[in-house]
């Protein structure tokens, strides 16, 4: 049967992502994969940490296994507020928080609440691919703003906003991952965060602050949340238990003005009624028992070690005319090769001949650039795999450079 | 701050549902609530049934607490296929199944994959409210088909399809809950199911078969699944663990042609990456240990008892000129009062003066009718509450009848 005639027009822009297809390749054990974005499997919740969980769930049986409120389990909202205040400096009350089915669902809600076909949405160059995928379903017009070592170039953003303004165009929101961005690994300075807020006020747009990595930065840099500096209610702050505890729960949270949170809840109700109460109670257990606060220093120590090994291996092995970012946290390093190299074309060779994989960077750029870039993940592979994998990748890149001219 | 200018146009059709607001009232313990749609809290998974679950999750740690494949945990897909075959007569392979975050998410995917603004969608009169809510986000044009004691009037459907056809209109799909429908409690006869399939073939549309209640029918009636009779790949079959095990997991499944399932997966990836692997492994545990198959006869016995008590109480107490359905399973009885009565207007009195609640039926009807109807839930209240609540409700209705003329 031919199903084409039944599909809505938006389906034509839904395409399987590169990352998705790559994840399948990375199942081949002989390939060292820098392609995923998964936490270290050794750092997933351990049996001894979760002791008492079963009894806890049974005690909460009537709530955990039943339908739950769309806004989320109230005690979990309270814990999230406490956590976001203590570690993120964000003040919020219970009407300003909603539990979501991972941050991904929050991005879907943003897509549905704010984007009509053709609306302007501003993103970073590069930006998080799965955000683009779900924004795409509402068919926006993208404006990409370049980044440097200090994050989004807010001076370029300002110029762009003036331009748009002179054409009578008012963007709906700026989407940013300001700390240890996926895919670039860079962080926006506090001055630029403040500048972004000023621009939001002047040009009247919202800011979507997506912050999965802000709680696992490696150094003493204080990455003040944009939401913590937001006096006008312009920032919708998103975070998740995926990186600090477990992605398998699919539990995240959004903090915003209570009117916006009410709209989030109405949209979410149609989408999945509520986030799994079982998952929420597991997150609550981990919060109440202090499991998450105890894990964070361990995650930081282990990921810092891996980042250091990756940066050192890149330093030791990569040929000249290759650049990469120096992330202060998170899970990713972003690499620029010589302009002549197309990392998408190079990928098959990487996997088949060099037994190493990565994500070609082009799909992270809404302006069609980035064909000579790649994203490398350092959280999932082991230390030894990082050393060996970067060695393999460098050999490939050297060979490509030699062939390219 | 005024957020109006940021919202997409579709937001104007998102309104908090009656059911949602009602669920809040039903928290007052002195009110007997027939308004919800929750399983009996006494029938949620018990500690003794789940013995070994913690150890099981820890054994599966690396998968349960990690990111998972969008299509779902493979072993769970296999169990779902086995279950759907054994109890539903449906044949499917692993490429024809996807695990969803409850059936509600599957309805959201249907909304996104198939509905462009203005497309025709056919639903029953009355139909499931949360389906309308999520279809609404894609702004379809509805056609409502009346039901009688044998389910959707497929003769009326056929007439309607001819009419639409003569105007050059081709509906995208018919959405039906063929067995123990929410809200009406009625079931479609097998002859009509066959007729619906014939019409789908003749007029070239898809059928969304939403089947949360089909596994807990009370008698010997064999309610053959429409999907089991589908030779052309026109049926998208949806079911869930919510009624047979636990709604708190938010785990459901869809069965359809593999091309459609691939499209489901692409849409779902943007929506929440995957259904919680933790929840999926709990469902898998319950499947593998036979917990669900052992529960089903108990659920049937207990819900049948409650249905019988509700029907008997209605029989004993309701004034003449009041009709109701006789469901063969599920959780709901639907009631028609005298035409002059508006159940929405009556609700405040019901709660405040008579301490009983229900869902006014009008919002289940896409054609604006049904103002004299109500949905009563019999799965959640206790047997004693059902007797007392129907008594209270009957007293109210008698008083209203006396006032109405």
Image (cartoon, coloured by chain):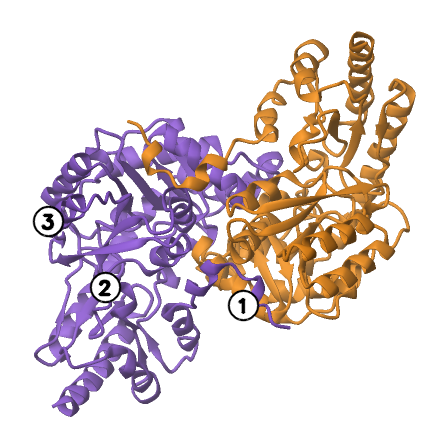
Chain colours: A orange, B purple
Residue behind mark 1: A262
Return the x and y of residue A156 as percentages of the image width and height.
79, 48
Give the foreground label among 1 and 3: 3
How far is the residue under mark 3 from the one under mark 2?
Answer: 17 Å
Dots 2 and 1 on the same chain = no
- SS for dot 1: helix
* The N terminus of chain A - image quarter: top left
To which chain does the residue with label 3 belong? B
How far is the residue under mark 2 from the one under mark 1?
Answer: 28 Å
The quarter of the picture where residue B264 lies is: top left
The quarter of the picture where residue A397 lies is: top right
- B204 on left or right of A38: left
Q: Which residue is located at x 72 percent, y 32 percent?
A: A380
- SS for dot 3: helix
Vertical relation: A8 (above or below) A171: above
The one of B267 and B141 positioned closer to us in this rendering: B141
User: Any mark on residue B367, and which?
Assistant: 2
Vertical relation: B364 (above or below) A246: below
User: Any mark on residue B159, and which?
Assistant: 3
* The C terminus of chain A - image quarter: top right
The one of B3 and A24 positioned closer to us in this rendering: B3
């Amino acid at each position: 049967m031919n199903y084409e005639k039944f599909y809505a027009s938006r389906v034509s822009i839904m395409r399987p992502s590169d990352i998705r297809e790559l994840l399948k390749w990375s199942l081949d054990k002989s390939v060292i994969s820098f392609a995923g974005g998964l936490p270290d499997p050794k750092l997933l919740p351990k049996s001894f940490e979760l002791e008492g969980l079963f009894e806890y769930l049974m005690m909460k049986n009537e709530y955990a296994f039943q339908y739950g409120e769309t806004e989320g389990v109230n005690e979990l909202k309270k814990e999230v507020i406490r956590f976001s205040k203590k570690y993120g400096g964000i003040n919020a009350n219970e009407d300003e928080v909603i539990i979501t089915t991972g941050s991904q669902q929050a991005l879907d809600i943003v897509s549905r609440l704010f984007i009509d076909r053709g609306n302007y949405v501003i993103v970073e160059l590069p930006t998080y691919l799965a955000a683009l995928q779900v924004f795409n379903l509402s068919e926006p017009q993208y404006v990409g703003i370049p980044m440097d070592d200090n994050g989004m170039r807010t001076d370029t953003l300002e110029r762009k906003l003036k331009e748009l303004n002179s054409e009578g165009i008012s963007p709906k929101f700026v989407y940013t991952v300001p700390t240890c961005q996926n895919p670039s690994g860079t962080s926006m300075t506090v001055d630029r965060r403040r500048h972004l807020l000023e621009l939001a006020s002047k040009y009247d747009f919202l800011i979507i602050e997506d912050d999965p990595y802000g709680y696992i930065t490696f150094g003493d840099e204080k990455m003040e949340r944009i939401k913590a500096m937001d006096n006008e209610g312009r920032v919708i702050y998103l975070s998740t238990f995926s990186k600090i505890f477990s992605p398998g729960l699919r539990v995240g949270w959004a903090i915003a003005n209570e009117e916006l949170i009410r709209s989030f809840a109405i949209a979410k109700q149609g989408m999945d009624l509520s986030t799994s109460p079982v998952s929420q109670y597991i997150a609550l257990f981990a919060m109440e028992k202090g499991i998450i606060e105890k894990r964070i220093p361990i995650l930081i120590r282990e990921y810092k070690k891996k980042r250091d090994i990756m940066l050192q291996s890149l330093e030791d092995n990569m040929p000249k005319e290759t650049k990469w970012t120096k992330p202060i946290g998170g899970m990713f390093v972003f690499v620029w090769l010589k302009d002549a190299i197309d990392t998408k074309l190079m990928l098959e060779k990487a996997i088949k001949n060099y037994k190493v994989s990565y994500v070609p960077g082009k799909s992270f750029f809404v302006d069609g650039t980035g064909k000579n870039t790649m994203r490398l993940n350092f959280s999932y592979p082991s230390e030894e795999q990082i050393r060996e994998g970067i060695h393999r990748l460098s050999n490939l890149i050297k060979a490509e450079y030699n062939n390219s001219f």
